[in-house]
Image: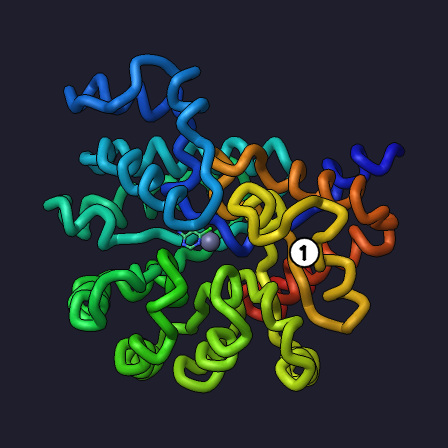
Amino acid sequence: LSIHDFIRQIPKAELHLHIEGTFEPELMFAIAQRNKVAIPYSSVEEVRKAYQFGNLQDFLDIYYAGAAVLQKEQDFYDLTMAYLLKAKEENIVHTEIFFDPQTHTERGIAFNTVITGIHKALLDGENKLGITSKLILCFLRHLSEESALKTLEQALPYKEWITAVGLDSSEVGNPPSKFQKVFEKAAEKGFLGVAHAGEEGNAEYVKEALNALKIDRIDHGNRSLEDPNLVKEIVDRKLALTVCPLSNLKLQVVKSPDLHPLKKMLELGMMATVNSDDPAYFGGYLNANFIVMTDALGLSKEEITLLAKNSFAASFLPEDEKEEKI
Ligand code: ES4
Ligand code: ZN
């Protein structure tokens, strides 16, 4: 078995995936057409050409613009099902999906429309494709804590469908402490917590995510490596990092594949996992992320196996279900 085939066939979990970031141009065109909404591109090629960003904010501007064609429950269903079919092809057997309700409620789409479309697809994903899943509600950190609190209120009737809350969007200037109250409230209601931290922000952002938000898992976390005491805490507490190699390259937080810290993280004893983040925008799904790292860093089959095991160990599945999949 070639190492690339080894990557393709090994069962994996994906723990860092924005459903709005799986929106492929072909589906975007189809949905724009049936909803009769205009998009600023005339062809799929033009959309792909526009997907050139040198940092997080440039990417987010395009990502939010694309999400604006999503209006009906069926649109959210189709978006989610398209990702699940891709996941099936890649031997992803469990996935934990972020969604950004505020991206949609801020433009007048009902919370119910968004979550029901996604949830129905996840049910079909489990029943027809055998893929288990969890849903993580992300607050947009460029908006106010008040808006996040309102979003948490809207989510409460759907508590059974949502496992955790998260924090995404523009990191620098929007530190975790801004959302301390809403994460406290979410914890009281029984939600787990995750947060994007140390992607563009420095190690202080990761420390705040741990101390102020008391998160259970760190999204990205790359810049933790700048603080040895923080690395020690992450190792000692077995906190997982959801690392996203192609995202890091596309957004230039890592300048080239051979400079990526993934292998270093494993060597330090950190529970790193590999994930695709926004695969329609960053040039590849989960296996492509494993492949770019394997080719650049010379990962062995043992290291790939460890990363796959970590993906289940770090998931929010109950312990007995983790055991079954590892
Ligand atoms: C995101 Cl890569 C990334 N970082 C922060 N927020 C996001 N939302 C979607 N992708
Ligand atoms: Zn992300």
Regarding residue 13, the answer to whether it shows in the image is no
Residue furthest to the left in view is 108
Looking at the rendering, in which quadrant would you find the N terminus? top right
Colour scheme in the image?
A: rainbow
Q: Amino acid at mark 1?
A: Lys
**Who is closer to the viewer here, 156 or 275?**
275
Image quarter in which the C terminus is found:
bottom right
Decide: is 80 above or below 198. Answer: above
**Which image quadrant for residue 65?**
top left
The percent position of residue 231, horizontal first and vertical second, equals 67, 78
Residue name at image x 69 percent, y 62 percent: 310
CB of residue at label 1: within 8 Å of ligand 2? no
Residue 217 visible in the displayed image: yes
Circle 1 residue? 325
At x 34% / y 60%, what residue is drawn? Answer: 137
In percent of width and height, residue 155 lies at 23, 63
Q: In which image quadrant can residue 121 be found?
A: top left
The x, y position of residue 207, in whole percent, is: 51, 81
Residue toward you, 174 or 294: 174
Q: Nearer the viewer, residue 129 or 5?
A: 5
88 in relation to 297, above or below = above
Q: How many marks?
A: 1
Q: Residue at x 45, y 81 (%)?
A: 208
Of 255 and 247, nearer the camera is 255
Mark 1 falls on what kind of element?
A: helix
